[in-house]
Amino acid sequence: MDDQHGSRHDARVLVVDDEPSIVRLMTRALQGAGYRTIEGITDPVEALAYLDHATPDLVVLDLSMPGVDGYAILEAISSRLPQDTFLPVMVVSGMDDMGARHRSMRAGAKDYLVKPIDLQEFILHVDSLVDTRMMSLRLQHVRGELEDQVRLRTQELHAAHLDILERLGRVAEVRDDATGQHTNRVARLGALIANELGYPEAEIDAIMRAAPLHDVGKIAIPDRVLLKNGRFEGEEREIMQTHCTVGAELLKGGRSELIQLAEEIAFCHHERWDGLGYPRGLAGEEIPEAARIVAVADAFDALTHERPYKEAWSVKDSLAELERERGRQFDPKVVDAFLRLMRREATYPSVPAEE
């Protein structure tokens, strides 16, 4: 993965484990895989000092260490990094229990391997996390460019702004949508719903431009979860749900109203009208309006298209499901607007035709 941020093998990897033999083993495996900048540390206190003056691209971390354990280091990483910085941490621990896994994930870890590790599997996980880190750095760079373009207020730069937004909207889709069209369909549906609700033209256009970024946080979800065949269980569900928070963090700090709207949608499109959604458990009109609209558009598109965990539903069954969830998962007025729209159209270009 070569770009302005360097290749994958230019990534800085920090290995923290109180057993020197483990540090040597993982360091040799990383070197054999082509990684050139590896810092191996056996003293967790020294690791904290290292993190005070350096920011690695990946941290490989043991949990059970004397003095300062891995959980303390996870907390230190979370507290010392800027909020919009994505730094993946892979826990490699001898503790093979769900409690340790869940606590690690809640503290900020992005992956968890149990000792003794298979070195080939270890490198595959490292490569995936480093690729995600490089993608987040590119997103930060592009976001800064977008803000500069908005400040310049020229027609040419505005067009480039919209083009890059559209491309960013496809970033997550290339991993779990073979066609790459999910973001476009959700954007079109969201704009049509907003129009049905009587939104001004400028706001309809903003929703259409921002909606494709609703799932951008999926770039941080490991393939073993994102591409799983079947429903998510326990820890997998917790990991998957982090895509809302990660997406909002990646977009956070944007000065343009469009980026701010995209952040809002990314953060809140899985909240529920009844307050049982995530990540904050917002209810009713506490949920931003644009996120309520995208939630319906996203759900309908997910229902009517095949996913790794499900077959495609018919349009009829999908509409019936939205109607059942009216006032529970979804804003009633948004569902009503969508149902009016669908009933008015004999054919609909954004959804598959009925068999």
Image (cartoon, rainbow, N blue to C red):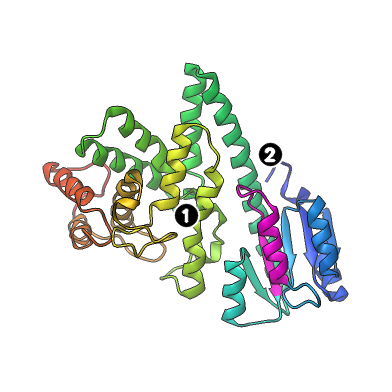
Q: Is residue 119 magenta?
A: no
The span picked out in magenta is: 70-92
Q: Is residue 7 visible?
A: yes
Residue at 43 percent across and 59 percent down: it is: 280
Task: Give the residue number, with chain letter if any, for mark 1.
Answer: 244
Residue 222 point in image, percent of width and height: 56, 62
Check whether the beta carbons of the residues at disc 1 and disc 2 lie within 8 A of each other: no
The quarter holding residue 92 reads bottom right
Q: Give the quadrant of the C terminus.
A: bottom left
Q: Is residue 340 left or right of residue 161?
A: left
Q: Secondary structure at mark 2?
A: loop
- Depth check, front residue: 44 or 212: 44
Say if residue 120 shows up in the picture: no
Q: Position of residue 114 (x, y in %)?
A: 67, 77
In the visual, does 283 lie left or right of 112? left
Residue that appears at 48% across and 63% down:
240
- Up-down relation of residue 202 to residue 11 (above or below): above
Q: Position of residue 50 (x, y in %)?
A: 83, 57
Q: Which mark is residue 3?
A: 2
Q: Quadrant of residue 252?
A: top right
Q: Is residue 77 magenta?
A: yes
